[in-house]
Image: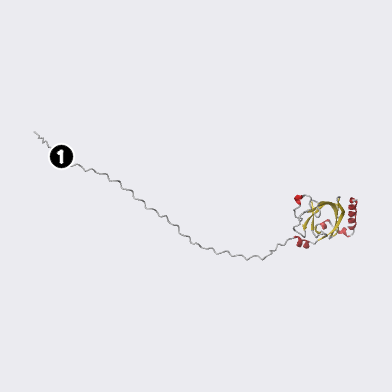
């Protein structure tokens, strides 16, 4: 029953795409689209000859993927999540594949049908979720998309005046204290040796022997 509901949704989108949509081309599906329920913006882009889509803007930038079945991914930001991966072309201006819904953390199988230059009918079903959904996304022009998705970095407060560098203070350096050489102590004079007084020459006092020479 659920599968037949999905087929009916696809048939309706195919019927709506008849007529003026014949003037459209595959290139018209690329760009930034607005999700009607919460105003989130989704960028559709080519990926390996197929179609991918990721969230590029949400009203609450602090919003995280709290409904993800993997607890490790529940703190990741919503912005940047790829919700359509490699959707394949199944008909004229129609792509089908699986999509991730950040509102409930479920995987849906569905289609994207380009019905006008600025309208895209997105339908999907999940075996455990009823009923199937169908939404019409509206395309933003290039300037509007840039104005919303591009963050303009403006300072909240006027920049503080640039302080001039303080004049360098000239610090007079004190002359280095010269080392005062200590006067060397004079070497001690050698001790004077005691000089024994010479005994008086008593040669004259000795008896003299006169030797006469007889020639």
Count of picture labels: 1
**Other residues around mark 1 within 10 Å, as few (<14) / some (14–19) / many (≥20):** few
211 left or right of 173? left
Q: Is residue 29 visible?
A: yes
Q: Which residue is under mark 1?
A: 203
Q: Is residue 91 visible?
A: no
Tell which of 214 and 81 is nearer to you.
81
183 left or right of 16? left
Label 1 sits on a secondary structure element that is helix
At horizontal 13% and vertical 40% (from top left) the residue drawn is 205
Q: Position of residue 143 (x, y in %)?
A: 77, 63
Furthest residue toward top: 215
Q: Position of residue 34 (x, y in %)?
A: 81, 59
The quadrant of the image that shows the C terminus is top left
Position above or below: 206 against 84:
above
At horizontal 76% and vertical 50% (from top left) the residue drawn is 71
Tell me where residue 179 sits by quadrant.
bottom left
Tell which of 11 and 123 is nearer to you.
123
Tell me where residue 159 sits by quadrant.
bottom right
Q: Position of residue 198 (x, y in %)?
A: 20, 42
Report the colour scheme: secondary structure
132 left or right of 73? right
Q: Position of residue 8 (x, y in %)?
A: 90, 54
Tell which of 57 and 61 is nearer to you.
61
């Amino acid at each position: 029953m659920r599968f037949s509901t999905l087929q009916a949704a696809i048939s309706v989108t195919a019927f709506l795409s008849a007529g003026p949509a014949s003037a459209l081309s595959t290139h018209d599906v690329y760009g930034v689209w607005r999700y009607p329920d919460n105003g989130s913006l989704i960028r559709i882009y080519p990926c390996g000859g197929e179609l991918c889509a990721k969230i590029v803007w949400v009203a609450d930038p602090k919003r995280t993927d709290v409904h993800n079945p993997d607890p490790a991914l529940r703190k990741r930001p919503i912005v940047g999540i790829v919700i359509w991966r490699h959707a394949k072309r199944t008909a004229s201006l129609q792509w089908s594949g699986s999509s991730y819904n950040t509102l409930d953390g479920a995987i849906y199988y569905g289609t994207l049908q380009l019905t006008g230059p600025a309208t895209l009918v997105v339908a999907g079903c999940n075996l455990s979720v009823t009923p199937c959904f169908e939404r019409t996304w509206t395309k933003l022009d290039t300037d509007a998309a840039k104005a919303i998705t591009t963050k303009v970095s403006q300072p909240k407060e006027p920049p503080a005046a640039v302080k001039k560098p303080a004049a360098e203070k000239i610090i007079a350096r004190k002359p280095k204290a010269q080392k005062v050489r200590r006067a060397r102590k004079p070497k001690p004079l050698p001790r004077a040796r005691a000089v024994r007084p010479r005994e008086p020459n008593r040669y004259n006092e000795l008896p003299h022997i006169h030797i006469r020479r007889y020639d």
